[in-house]
C-alpha cells in the first residue's frame, strides 16, 4: 500500500514531503482546496521543483493527483486506503481536516484493519501530537480503542521555501522553488508498525528537543535577520542581503546562541556547544543563499503570530530566563519586530500586520508586550523594561 495522502499541496507539501516519498516509489495524493492547483495536478500528474542553491537542479515529482477537500467521501476513502498520511496545511487550518481524517479512520477500521496508520504532522507546531489527538477525538466515538489510534508523528521542518512571484505562479501553478536542504526530522517513537523506507528521514528519540531547536534557533534566527534587517535599512529586500551585513549577522548569531545555550541546559543528552555551533553556522550559511532569494517580507510577516508567548521570540526569552541566560539580543529582535513594515510584491503589508500596526502597536509598545506577548506587568516587568529600552533606542538612534 505505497500511497501517501498529503493534506495541503502548498510549498512544504509539494517541495518537501511529496518529493521525498515520490522518490521512494510512493503514489502521492494531495488533499487541497485550491481549484487551480487541483486542476493542474489531475491534468499533468507531475510537477517540477527548481532547487535554488549553490548547485541548481530541476526535480520532477510524478505519480501525483489531487482530491478537493470539499469532496468528503473521496477524502475519507483516501484516508482509509492510505499507506501513510501527512499534513502540511498550516496549524490554523488543522481544524478543517480532523473530521474527514477521523471518519476515514473509522472506515479504515472496517475495510483495512490489519494495517496500522501513521500521520506525519508537518506543521512546525509545538506539542503537535497532543493537539492533533484532541482534534481527532472530537469526531471519534468515545470508546474508540486507544491502540487503534494512528501514530501521530511530530516533525521538525527545516526546509526553506520562498514566496513564488505572481508571474511564475501564473505560468505554472505547480512550480515551486526550494533550497537543497532535504532532511525531515521525525519522532521515531510514535510510528506504529513499519517505519517507511524513505531517504531523507532523520528519526529521533527525543523529538521535543528538535522541535524546540527548530523554533528557538532556526525560526528565531531567521526572524531576527528579517526584523533587524528592516530596522537597519527598510529598502533591503532579501534575507541574504541582511545577513551579509556584519552588525545584523552578529546580533542574529548571538540571539541564536542565547537559545543554543538554553537548549543545552534543557536537553543535555542531545545538545552541546559543538553540535549547536555546527547547527548555527550551517543555518547562517543557508540564510546567505542568494539563489533562493528569500524575502525579508516573507520571513518577517505575521508579527502577532511570531510574537505570541510560546513562539520563537518570547518563548526563547522564557527559556533563557529559566536557565539564567542573557537574552539581550533576542530582546533586540523583539524590539525591532514591532517596527517591521516590509511589503509584499503588490506593495502592501501582510493583512494581519496591517491590523497589528493600526490597532495594537498604535497604542504603544507596552500594549504589544502585554496583549500579544502576554507578558505580565508585575512578574515580567524586567523583560518589559529591557525590550522597551531597546525599542526606545531604535526609535531615537535608528540602530539596535
Image (tube, rainbow, N blue to C red):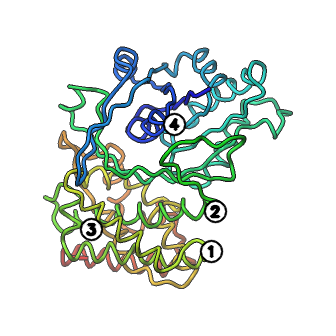
Q: Which mark is residue 134?
A: none
Q: Quadrant of residue 265?
A: bottom right
> Could you give the CA–CA distance between mark 4 and mark 2, rounded to whole angstroms?
26 Å
Using residue 176 as the reference point, say whether residue 374 is left or right of it. right
Tell me the residue at 64%/52% (across/down).
188
380, above or below 308, in the image: below
> Could you give the CA–CA distance between mark 1 and mark 2, rounded to whole angstroms?
9 Å
Q: Which mark is residue 93?
A: 4
Q: Residues within 10 Å of mark 4 (few under 14, many from 20)?
A: few
> Could you give the CA–CA distance between mark 4 and mark 1, rounded to whole angstroms?
34 Å
Tell me the residue at 49%/19% (across/down).
67
Tell me the residue at 30%/32% (across/down).
48
Tell me the residue at 17%/55% (across/down).
237
Sooner in the amino-acid sequence: mark 2 or mark 3: 2
* Disc 4 and disc 1 in contact, CB within 8 angstroms: no
Q: Tell which tag, 4 or 1, sits nearer the viewer.
A: 1
Q: Which residue is mark 2?
A: 206
In this rendering, does residue 378 appear at all?
A: no
Sooner in the amino-acid sequence: mark 4 or mark 2: 4
Q: Residues within 10 Å of mark 3 (few under 14, many from 20)?
A: many
Q: Which mark is residue 269?
A: 1
Q: Circle 1 — which element?
A: loop
Q: Nearer the viewer, residue 264 or 235?
A: 264
Quadrant of the snapshot with the N terminus? top right
Q: Which mark is residue 228?
A: 3
Amino acid at each position: 500500500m505505497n500511497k501517501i495522502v498529503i493534506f495541503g499541496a502548498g510549498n512544504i507539501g509539494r517541495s518537501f514531503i511529496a518529493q521525498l516519498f515520490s522518490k521512494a516509489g510512493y503514489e502521492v495524493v494531495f488533499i487541497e482546496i485550491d481549484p487551480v492547483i487541483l486542476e493542474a495536478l489531475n491534468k499533468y500528474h507531475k510537477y517540477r521543483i527548481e532547487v535554488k542553491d549553490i548547485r541548481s537542479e530541476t526535480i520532477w515529482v510524478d505519480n501525483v493527483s489531487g482530491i478537493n477537500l470539499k469532496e468528503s467521501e473521496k477524502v475519507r476513502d483516501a484516508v482509509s486506503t492510505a499507506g501513510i498520511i501527512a499534513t502540511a496545511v498550516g496549524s490554523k487550518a488543522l481544524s478543517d481536516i480532523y473530521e474527514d481524517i477521523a471518519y476515514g479512520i473509522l472506515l479504515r477500521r472496517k475495510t483495512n484493519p490489519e494495517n496500522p496508520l501513521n500521520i506525519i504532522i508537518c506543521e512546525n507546531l509545538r506539542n503537535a501530537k497532543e493537539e492533533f489527538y484532541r482534534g481527532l477525538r472530537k469526531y471519534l466515538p468515545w470508546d474508540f480503542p486507544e491502540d487503534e489510534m494512528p501514530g501521530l508523528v511530530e516533525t521538525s521542518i527545516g526546509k526553506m521555501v520562498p514566496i513564488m512571484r505572481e508571474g511564475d505562479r501564473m505560468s505554472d501553478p505547480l512550480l515551486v522553488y526550494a533550497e537543497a536542504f532535504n532532511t525531515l526530522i521525525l519522532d521515531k517513537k510514535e510510528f506504529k508498525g513499519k517505519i517507511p523506507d524513505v531517504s531523507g528521514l532523520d528519526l529521533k528519540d527525543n523529538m521535543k528537543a528538535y522541535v524546540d531547536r527548530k523554533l528557538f534557533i532556526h525560526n528565531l534566527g531567521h526572524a531576527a535577520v528579517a526584523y533587524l534587517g528592516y530596522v537597519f535599512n527598510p529598502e533591503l529586500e532579501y534575507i541574504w542581503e541582511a545577513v551579509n551585513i556584519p552588525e545584523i549577522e552578529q546580533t542574529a548569531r548571538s540571539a541564536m546562541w542565547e537559545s543554543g545555550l538554553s537548549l543545552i541546559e534543557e536537553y543535555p543528552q542531545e545538545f552541546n556547544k559543538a553540535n549547536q555551533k555546527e547547527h548555527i553556522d550551517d543555518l547562517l550559511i543557508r540564510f546567505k543563499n542568494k539563489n533562493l532569494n528569500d524575502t525579508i517580507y516573507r520571513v518577517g510577516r505575521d508579527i502577532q503570530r511570531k510574537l505570541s508567548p510560546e513562539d520563537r521570540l518570547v518563548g526563547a526569552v522564557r527559556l533563557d530566563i529559566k536557565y539564567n541566560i542573557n537574552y539581550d539580543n533576542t530582546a533586540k529582535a523583539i524590539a525591532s519586530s514591532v517596527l517591521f513594515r516590509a511589503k509584499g510584491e503588490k506593495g502592501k503589508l501582510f493583512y494581519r500586520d496591517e491590523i497589528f500596526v493600526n490597532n495594537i502597536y498604535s497604542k504603544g509598545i507596552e500594549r504589544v508586550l502585554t496583549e500579544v506577548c502576554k507578558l505580565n506587568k508585575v512578574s515580567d516587568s524586567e523583560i518589559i523594561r529591557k525590550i522597551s529600552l531597546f525599542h526606545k533606542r531604535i526609535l531615537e538612534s535608528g540602530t539596535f
